[in-house]
Image (cartoon, coloured by chain):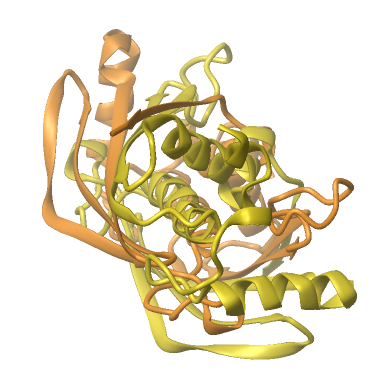
Chain colours: A yellow, B orange
Amino acid sequence: MPDVIAPAARAPREPRNGVNTPDLLATINAVKEMPHLAKFRFRASNRWMSGTYSESRVESFSGAGGEHTHQTQFRYDADHPAVLVGQDRGPTPIEFLLHGLASCITAGIGNIAAVRGVTLTSVESRVEGDIDLRGILGLSDQVRNGYERIRISFDIAGDAPPEKLREIVQQACDRSAVFDVLTHGVPVDVSINSR
Amino acid sequence: MPDVIAPAARAPREPRNGVNTPDLLATINAVKEMPHLAKFRFRASNRWMSGTYSESRVESFSGAGGEHTHQTQFRYDADHPAVLVGQDRGPTPIEFLLHGLASCITAGIGNIAAVRGVTLTSVESRVEGDIDLRGILGLSDQVRNGYERIRISFDIAGDAPPEKLREIVQQACDRSAVFDVLTHGVPVDVSINSR
């Protein structure tokens, strides 16, 4: 399977899987020449509504040397479920991490398959996280607040041998921004203005 | 400010801030007696649509000794923006981590304030993450794939002195599941079924 080792060198470069492969490769080359274009800053704002219920907006970000506005003003609710004394007006905040993980790796699969000349027919994943709430409830110093473990399983089908499809998923994990943050952590600075 | 040190002992226990405080305290006591109730498993499923665009569903979870279905079948899109050769049909996956972080800490603020007898009038936050895309584009081994740093800033107002409001935000960070996962990381197991 030599094309797994150096796939980009021999793969066709036409659009595939809904990916504009020539544009993607041109973007990568542009960033290679001008590394400052790679600096992005993503943002969200959140407003408390009531109880454990809040709403976030995701509207703009900076990157590629400029400021960008999403085509849609995205809004997301979060809440705790009834069993945790919330009103279930949105998923639990920690469930959004699972969506972020699955969608990040899946976006990478789409891109990588296109660059490697593989046409995908289906990519589905299931992701789950185990958490012991004694941590956040302050009932045990031995239990962490967050997930103890996350599992994600992919079903992928396309016009390549199973081993090549596996390689694409693995590469997508190896280059996933969310996978990196979740597995390695990131410094978070908190500032508070109270009045 | 002795009530910051042992707030629950002296705070009133009526509903407040939209939090059913008596139910919340009863839930914590129930879990204290029966620790197995604290085991939760959250889930999402994701389906690739095209390019970098996918959709997740958040429908059910287990915990408190049973299986639960959200009142609404939550669906979320994710995509890459045009500047990253996507079609912006949803936020970038890594933006959902920012929503998860802000909403998790904010849910904690609502609960903790209620238990401490503080009535909130406003909680707003802005969160941003810095990322250098040379990591995920495979252009530099010196650059990580994910965020290099996240900053979150809170504006909080209520019927308590500023220092007590700050304490509530700090305690919410100290007991936030998402804050813990993002700052400390979590093991992620990947399995792949290719055909």
Residue B164 image offset from top left, x and y in percent? 64, 54
Horizontally, residue A100 falls left or right of residue A31, namely left
Quadrant placement of the N terminus of chain B:
top right
Task: Please state which of residues B117 and A13 is positioned toward the viewer in this rendering.
Answer: A13
Percent position (x, y) of residue B96? 48, 60
Q: Is residue B129 left or right of residue B187?
A: right
Q: Is residue A183 left or right of residue B158?
A: right
Q: Position of residue B87 (x, y in %)?
A: 43, 80
Question: Taking B57 as reference, is A18 above or below it?
Answer: below
Q: Could you tell me which residue is drawn at 68 percent across and 39 percent down?
A: A185
Task: Determine the image quadrant of residue B73.
Answer: bottom left
Is any part of residue B3 visible from this angle?
Answer: no
Q: In this view, does A1 lie above or below B58?
A: above
- The image position of residue A18, as x and y in percent, is 38, 72
Q: Kindly indicate the quadrant of the structure image that contains residue A174.
A: top right
Which is more toward the observer, B194 or B146? Answer: B194
Which residue is more in the foreground, B19 or B130? Answer: B130
Query: In the picture, which quadrant includes the C terminus of chain B?
Result: top left
Number of residue marks: 0
**In the image, residue A110 above or below residue B64:** below
The residue shown at (32%, 19%) is B39
- Whether residue A83 is visible here, answered yes or no, is yes
